[in-house]
Amino acid sequence: MKQTPLFSIKFISCFLFAAFHVGAFCQNTGTVRGKITDSKTSQSIESVNVIVANSSLGTVTDKSGNFRIQIPASQEIILIFSHLNYKADSLRLSMKPSETRDVKIALLSSSTELPTIVVEDIRQRESGIYRINPKFATSLPSAAGGIESLLKLQGGVVANNELSSQFSVRGGSFDENLVYVNDIEIFRPFLVSSGQQEGLSFVNSDLASLVNFSAGGFDAKFGDKMASVLDIKYKQPQEFAASASASLLGASVHVEDRPNNGRFSYLAGARYKTNAYLVKTFDVEGDYKPNFFDFQTLLSYKINDKLDISFLGYLARNSYNLTPSVQNTTFGTNTNPLNLTIFFEGGEKDCYNGQLGALTLTQKASENLQIKWIVSSYAATESVSYDIQGDYILQAVLEDVPKDLWETLGVGSYLRHARNNLEMNVSNIENRYNYSWGNHSFAQWGIKYQHERIDDKINEWYLFDSAGYVLPNHTGIPGDSGNISNLELAYYLNSKIKLNSNRYSAFAQNTWNFETANSANFSLTVGGRVQYWDYTQQLLFSPRAAISYKPSWKTDILFRFSAGHYFQPPFYRELRLPDGSLNSDIKAQESIHFVAGSDLNFKLLSRPFKFVTEIYYKDFSHLIPYTIDNVQILYSGRNNSNGYAAGIDLKLNGEFVPGSESWISLSFMRTGENIYDDHYTNYTYQPGNQPYLPPVLPNNGLIDSTYVTPGAVPRPNDQFFTLGIFFQDYLPGNPSWKVNMGLYFGSGQPIYAPNFPKTSDPVRFPWYRRVDVGMSKQIVGYEPTKSSNRVLKHFKALWITGEVLNLFGFRNVASYNWVKDFQGRQYGVPNYLTSRQLNIKLIAEF
C-alpha cells in the first residue's frame, strides 16, 4: 500500500499522479510485490522508492518494508530501488500478463561506518557547530542562491534582503561574521551599498563538500569576531564528475577529477549571474546592466603519503550599471495614501573586482601530529561613480481623482555625486598544528601574521533643494561681506587615506573527553587567542571554554554550555570617522558570550529527527555604533556605546517527508545599546507651531524644553521574531517529481530617520515576509543503468525546475528615501524589494 508523505501538496500531487498513471494502466500488466530489508540487520526499510526505469511508475515501501507495484507485461523492465540512506539497487525482469511475482531485496547502507566520520559527528555536536548539506543550495528556490540562502533559514540568522548574501547573526552587523574556505578567511566588498549591486558571494556551492556553522560561543581556533563562524570545506575529488546549470538569473558549471586515480586532483567552477530580470520589478524604471562573474579552482597534489600541497585560486569581475529614468512609488496608510514621482537624469557605474591566491602545505608528521602551512593573498579594486539628478513631486492620493488633480504636498530636487575608489590587499602566512592523544584528547594551536594595505579615495556630495530653497537654507545674500550665506551642501566628504598595518595572532586549545562509570560522556574544550595590531598597539587576550555532557539515558541527548570573551579589532571601515579621517585611538569591540543548549536526536514515525535549542546572552562593551542603509554599514568611528543581546534559537530538522530532509527554525531576540552622548532636548510648542524637523526655531511658539537621555535603544539589527522553513516533498509513488519551499518571516527592524535622535521605541520596518516555491522534474536519475536515449545517456542526473519567487507578492522594504513637504515634514519613502517572478532552471550532472 502506498504511503502518502506528510505535508504533501495534495492538489498538485493528485493531479500529476493521475495524469502520469492513466497510460500505464491501459495495457496488460503484471504485479510485483515484495519486501525490502537492510542487508546487515535484516530489518525492514520504510519509504524505499521503487521506480520503473524510464517511466513515471513507482511506489514506496510501507512500515514493514513491503511494496506492491503493477508493471507493463510482455517486455523487459528494470525496477530501481533507492533510499536516502542506502545504495541504489536494481532488478531486471519480464512479466506475463496478469502474472504476480514475489521478490526480496536487501539494500546496502550508503553510510559506511568509518570511525573518523563517527568521531567527527560527535565533535560537531560537542562544539556547537552544525552541519548543513550544501546540496540543498541547489534545491532551495532563491533569488540570490548559494550557501548563504540556506543560512538565512537557520536559527539566529537574520537577512531581510533576498538580493544580498549578507546576514546578521544574533543582533550583530554583517562585519561580525567569520567566513572560511579551507581555513582561509574570506572578505566582503567594502563599497557595495545595495543588494542588487552585490553580485556573487565568494562561496561556490557546487564546489563545497562540508558546510559548518556556529551562531556563537565558538572555539578559540576561529578568529576574532563577535557573532558567527561559517566554515566551508571544498571537495577532494576521487573520480570524474561535472555539473552545469542555467536559469533566467544566470548559469554555472563545475568539473572535478583525479586522473588515473593518481596523486593530482583538480576542482574548478565558473559562475555567471545577472539580476536584471529581478530588478525590473523595482519602482525605479531604467536601464539596468548588472553582470557578475567569477572563477575558482582548487588544485591538489599528493607529494607522498605524508605530504600534500594545494592551491586555491579565485577571480571575480562584478559590474553594476544603472541609468534610471523615473520612479513612481505609492506608500503611506489606507487612510492617508501618498505618491512620490521622481524624474531622473544621469547614471551610475560600479565595479567590484577581487582576486585570491592561497597555497596550503599539509604534513602528517606522525600518526598523531598534523602540520599545516597556509600562505594567501587577497586583492580587491572597487570603484563607485555616479551623477544622478532627481526632480520629485510628493502628492496626496485622492481616490477616483486623476493624478494631475492630486494635492501637491512637496516639490524638490536633489543631485548626488560620487567618485570613490578603493584598493585593498590582505596577505598572511599561518602555521597550524593538530595533535591527538588517542581518543580522549585533541589539541590545536597555531600562529598567524597578516599585512593589510588599503588605499581609499572618497569624493562624494549631496545637494538637496525643496520648493526652490537649497537645504540647509540660510537667509542672506551669498558672498556678501555683511550678510554671508554661502551655498552649503547637505553632505560633503572628500578624503584620501592610505593605511599599512600588521596584525599578529596566535591560538591554542585542547579538548578532553571523559566517560563516567555509568557510561555518561563529558567533553571539555579550553582555549584562548592572543592578537596584536600595530596600528592601535592594543594587545588582546580572548579566553574561551565549552563543556558538553551526554548522559547515559536511552534518549540521545547532549547538553552544552560555552562562554568566552570575544574581541573584534576594527578593520578599515570601523576606523573611519564621518569626516573621512581615521581614529587612531579606537579600540577593539568586546563581547562576553554565554550560550547554553541541548541537542536531541530522536525518531518520529520511524524517521530520524534532530531538535536543537540554544539560549544565549551577550554583554557588549566598547561598541562602535552604526546605521544600516540597505546593505551599507555606516560606522560612527568611535567606541561610544555598550549593549547586550539575548534570545533563544530553536531548530527542528528531519524527514518530515520520508527520504527528504526539511527543517523549521524559530528565534526570539532582543539587542540594544546605550550610546554615551546621544542626549537631546525635547521642546514643547503652542498648538499649531510645532516644527517637524530640527533645528529648533525658538521664536516659533516655544513653551518649554526637556533634557532627554534615551538610555538603551535598539541596535540596527534588533529583530524580535524570525521564522525560517525549508521544506521538501515529492509526489506519492513518484519521487522524480519534487517540491521545494523556502519561507522567511521576521518582525521589523528599527528605522532611524536622519536628523532625528534615536529613541527606545523607534518606528520599525514592516515585517519581512517571503515564500519561494519550486517544482522539479528529474528527467534522468541516479540509475544503475544508462538511459537508452542517445542524448540522455550522457547524463548522470538531469533536472528541470520551475520556480515562483515571492509567491504571494509581498512588498518587502529594503530602505527608505527621505523627502520633505512644503511645511518641512519629513517622509520616509520605501525602496521596495523584488515582487513575484517566475524562474526556469535546468540542472545537469555528469
Image (tube, rainbow, N blue to C red):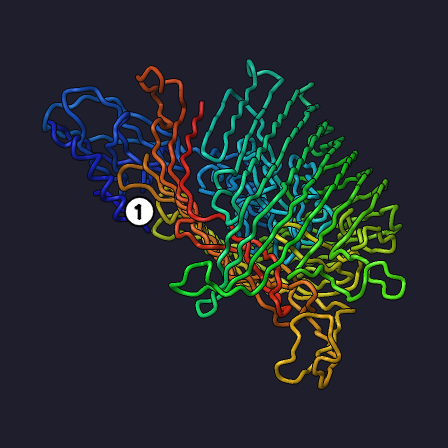
Left or right of 690: which side holds 794?
left
Please state, as top left, top right, bottom left or bottom right, where the N terminus lies in the image.
top left
Count of labels in the image:
1
| Residue 468 in sight here | yes
Left or right of 174: which side holds 664?
left
Looking at the image, which residue is at 27% across and 31% down? 51
Looking at this view, is 627 or 148 the one in front? 627
Looking at this view, is 115 or 393 the one in front? 393
Looking at the image, which residue is at 56% across and 35% down? 289
Left or right of 800: which side holds 590?
right
Give the crowd class for mark 1: few <14, some 14-19, many >=20 residues within 10 Å.
many
| Residue 517 in sight here | no
Residue 720, given in percent of the width and then of the height, sits at 55, 64
Residue 282, given in percent of the width and then of the height, sits at 50, 47
| Amino acid on which the number 1 mark rests in the picture | Pro
Residue 84, given in percent of the width and then of the height, sits at 40, 37
Q: Quadrant of residue 266?
A: top right
Q: Quadrant of residue 845?
A: top left
Q: Is residue 107 above or below residue 773?
A: above
- Judged from the image, the secondary structure of the residue bearing numbered disc 1 is loop
Looking at the image, which residue is at 27% across and 45% down? 12
Left or right of 88: which side holds 353?
right
Residue 436, given in percent of the width and then of the height, sits at 69, 39
Q: Is residue 137 above or below residue 768?
A: above
Residue to which mark 1 is pinned? 5
Please state, as top left, top right, bottom left or bottom right, where the C terminus lies in the image.
top left
